[in-house]
Amino acid sequence: MRIPIDARGVYPIAPTPFFDDGRIDTASVDRLTDFYLASGCTGLTVLGQLGEAPKLEHAESLAVATQMIRRAGKLPVVVGVSAPGFAAMRALTHEVMARGAAGVMIAPPNTLRTDDQIVGYYRQAVEAIGADVPFVLQDYPLTFSVQMTPGVIRRIVSELPSCVMLKHEDWPGLEKISALRAWEKEGALRHVAILTGNNGLFLDYEMARGADGANTGYAFPDMLCDVVRLSAQGQREEAHDLFDAHLPLLRYEQQPGVGLSVRKYVLMRRGLIRCEAQRRPAAPFTAAAKAEVEHLLGRLARHDRRAAVGAA
Amino acid sequence: MRIPIDARGVYPIAPTPFFDDGRIDTASVDRLTDFYLASGCTGLTVLGQLGEAPKLEHAESLAVATQMIRRAGKLPVVVGVSAPGFAAMRALTHEVMARGAAGVMIAPPNTLRTDDQIVGYYRQAVEAIGADVPFVLQDYPLTFSVQMTPGVIRRIVSELPSCVMLKHEDWPGLEKISALRAWEKEGALRHVAILTGNNGLFLDYEMARGADGANTGYAFPDMLCDVVRLSAQGQREEAHDLFDAHLPLLRYEQQPGVGLSVRKYVLMRRGLIRCEAQRRPAAPFTAAAKAEVEHLLGRLARHDRRAAVGAA
Amino acid sequence: MRIPIDARGVYPIAPTPFFDDGRIDTASVDRLTDFYLASGCTGLTVLGQLGEAPKLEHAESLAVATQMIRRAGKLPVVVGVSAPGFAAMRALTHEVMARGAAGVMIAPPNTLRTDDQIVGYYRQAVEAIGADVPFVLQDYPLTFSVQMTPGVIRRIVSELPSCVMLKHEDWPGLEKISALRAWEKEGALRHVAILTGNNGLFLDYEMARGADGANTGYAFPDMLCDVVRLSAQGQREEAHDLFDAHLPLLRYEQQPGVGLSVRKYVLMRRGLIRCEAQRRPAAPFTAAAKAEVEHLLGRLARHDRRAAVGAA
Amino acid sequence: MRIPIDARGVYPIAPTPFFDDGRIDTASVDRLTDFYLASGCTGLTVLGQLGEAPKLEHAESLAVATQMIRRAGKLPVVVGVSAPGFAAMRALTHEVMARGAAGVMIAPPNTLRTDDQIVGYYRQAVEAIGADVPFVLQDYPLTFSVQMTPGVIRRIVSELPSCVMLKHEDWPGLEKISALRAWEKEGALRHVAILTGNNGLFLDYEMARGADGANTGYAFPDMLCDVVRLSAQGQREEAHDLFDAHLPLLRYEQQPGVGLSVRKYVLMRRGLIRCEAQRRPAAPFTAAAKAEVEHLLGRLARHDRRAAVGAA
């Protein structure tokens, strides 16, 4: 199955679960995938920035992606294939597509500056991986230092039919969604799915701006699914109530670097992965930070019983 | 009065109020200053990044700073003097100190990279402005692209006795506060005040980590004062309850660029400044964004009646 | 006099001469200006990046610019007015234009990334200084981290009639000159003067690509004048012979940071300024570096007797 | 054989030769290696930044490295193993060391900023590849945006005994060599080889500052060998005469991006590789640029008959 052009809902960014000794925890990979399915996720993304992709040997990357693709069954699985050169990007793309991936996600290298450089990069990436492979354009200036205007995104979408989704993580980013959707309405831009990132920090307003859902790794993807569903059903205040209850934790988890530690810790506390372990390099996760996360979970549990994870 | 070494509480970053035609609205300068006093603020900062300092003529900068210093009476007023060269920094520093400023705030130029460059810059800045002028070290990597480790801050504090306060805006930043306070406890670092920025996004946990308060521009500085006070009194859950109610708006206001528009709009809606006008260049503030802010205010008003600002 | 649209020749970037105690050496300002006139320079630029502009008090900046403008007589004098805000840029522009400046030079702030941001910045700068003030567009990515494609320069030149000159310092940059001149030939771009920078490092080939001359601070502007003249007269190999003789020193002087020390030292050794002093901050200029410069001058003197400056 | 701690001379950065259809030209790999041996090179580096390493499939990288290692016989061959993650770095390192590589070269990722981040990165890299693998520290701020002070280099050399060579490409960089050698003289730093880069742009003075030779890709490595030898023999002016004759071309070849095109073109014209072809992405190399290179070769041939390559 390929990424549908009218994708919507929640594509969580899957972490890669490890045991404390650094081996991949394949049972947790299955448990996590099953949980995404059960939560109402409509797709998922593996080997993203937060999936610790660069810490995996090539064979491990393939194994994790393949396992998730098989386990996810009918759900489309997108694989991150960003690489310092097109040779590696092409190789991984062909391998995962052959194993049933729904498409790939490509982030821009942080050396790109001008509009032409950005468009040129994606043109060459498509030449490398093949125009038949659906790809997700990742627009994440905070991490990649590459700033794409709406006009640049329009150029990429217009020139490259295999661009089927925007992973939108600009900050601020609400006006960008509005600008793209206004062009679409005017017939100046074909439709692509817009799923938003930034851990969901603005999901409460992004839906009304025209986003189709979320493509991010917050440790309660089930909450993201609920917010998207409530928004779609017109239950706006209910969506905000649920979102606001999660915002203190969500904001805490969105911190660069340490965020992945928080995420894995919460997933472990929820019983979804067995260990919070990361491979190195990893930001330190101190006792003070853990206590803060426990405090946040405790406060959240008053509003959402999914956060009632018992004593640490 | 000079910035006290044991400063604590809230030093709001004051915006510069304009009329719609771009003239400075001096009545609003007074109203705002009076409000800060009445809210329990313990100091204030003018001509910061968000005070639109670079858009003011030199004479205007002096006039705004002088008016605030006089109106604030016993409150210490810190003046932002960051400049592309030491000549301009020295000139403005001497002028505002002569008019009663409590000290100055210095941000690092975004070309600094190595530890030695950063320390060297502050050493030269102190030579330029004089070692008798108390200064606030602004650590704001997100905006200035300069990363100061705890070790660099310790070097600056140790070498330069006139450094009396850290405006802490690193992100993530909680561990940095803990590291500095741990050194202080061990006797490895003298005490400096740590007031936090980032619009207060982590103030709820920063207080317990050892921060002395906030030095930021959120449009409800009275809430920041309450959170600092509740934290100091040990009413931790009450502090979190109040903070969490504000977090949806606070997070929205913390967006780069558009954040100042939100802040001025809310201050206007609260009756604290007359116009939301900014001088150019200013990020656009669309009707959709305004409606979102009104929605956020409406939801906030259910928890904090200070947000009940009536219909727009 | 205004910068002519068909400017050509050499506009040296003038350093600001200081005494060892930091005072401005006005006699050297005059001597330098007279030398530029006598050398065949066709204009000059003051208060550039290398004129130590940020180290001058405002009154000093005005004084230096005014002295050069008066002394230069019929030569057009361009004044650098780059500033962190439009208020300061406008103020300085109006003051120097009132004193007879031929135009101003504006560098982009290093936070600009997208094509639209760059064009928008210059649009707003022109609104600030007035559309009647001729300006030089400085394209210097190595120092300012702002990358302007030929297309962006075309947009700026097309939208803003007061843009009359490009100070071209991209690296690599030869193809950019060719691209702009090709558009001009096709009628797709109006003519603007292109004077090149980078200390003249590629002047030998830039002339044939379509440059009109140089706008840089190499300590032998008389050599630059000769190369431009020989090129214009079709004496290409003679131009290269002279240029190549200077290249070892020129390359040495082009080093970031220390380059200004080398330049001032050589100008002092040539008797054109009295002291090599810089105001702080200044890169260290070690004894080893001085000995290397003397060695370079000695070797150069075998080919160009202007370098025969006697024993140090 | 391992990289000797007292390495000296010239380690050229080998390009990867391709046919016009993109296949690797193994005959040219041999010819190039033989030429390096015959020219007096004392080692060589493959899969560097300019070896188009990211454009190779993994198997191709291994094949090229292995071929060079075998062909080079007694010459130590260093392999570039920079990668976005330690997993890939470790894998490639182990493969090439098993095939006889003398060590590896590691460039810092361009996200590193603080001194601690830089030192920490190399500490983790050594943990990943093993403390028994000699490595070359690449200090190239212009390309990697990472600034290493002499103090940081000292920390790395002191903490990590497997650091045996510095590829020095800072700009300006002469004082850095002097600083490191002064520490060595004082006994504050153990000896590591310092081979310089930047296409050799300052080799004429770097030798006297304490460099041991060059580690760069200029298309006349035989000239670099001569300059190093003449310098070592005390024939300083002869070294400068030869170097200065090459400087116009060397400077032209040092341009970012297009430099590799120039280098491959000159190597082809010298008969050392068969095609000038690069894999994509490659900077355009225009007819005008080619004509300039031919002109430079023609002028150089008057001083060095190795540049007499016949008509294009």
Image (cartoon, coloured by chain):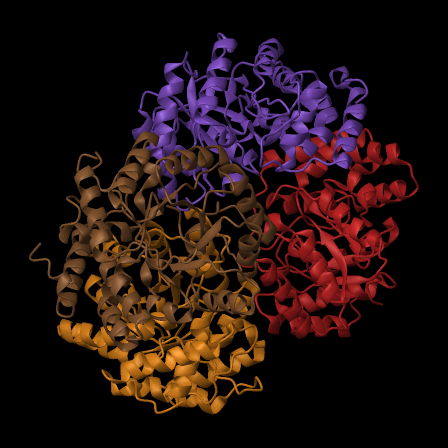
Chain colours: A purple, B red, C orange, D brown
Q: Nearer the viewer, residue D312 or B19?
A: D312
Name the spot of residue B127 as percent of width and height, x first.
67, 74
Name the spot of residue B114 as percent of width and height, x first.
57, 58
Q: Nearer the viewer, residue D148 or C260?
A: D148
* Left-right relation of D113 to B170: left
At x 30% / y 85%, what residue is drawn?
C307
- Whether residue C284 can be seen here: yes
Q: Nearer the viewer, residue D31 or B277?
A: D31
Image height of C33 relative to D221, above or below = below
User: Please, which residue is most extreme toward the left here?
Assistant: D311
Image height of A263 relative to B256, above or below = above
At x 75% / y 70%, what residue is drawn?
B133
* Left-right relation of C21 to A56: right
Image height of D16 relative to C239, above or below = above
At x 51% / y 67%, what residue is drawn?
D179
Name the spot of residue C56 as percent of width and height, x first.
56, 76
* Quadrant in which the N terminus of chain A appears: top left
* Left-right relation of B66 to A137: right
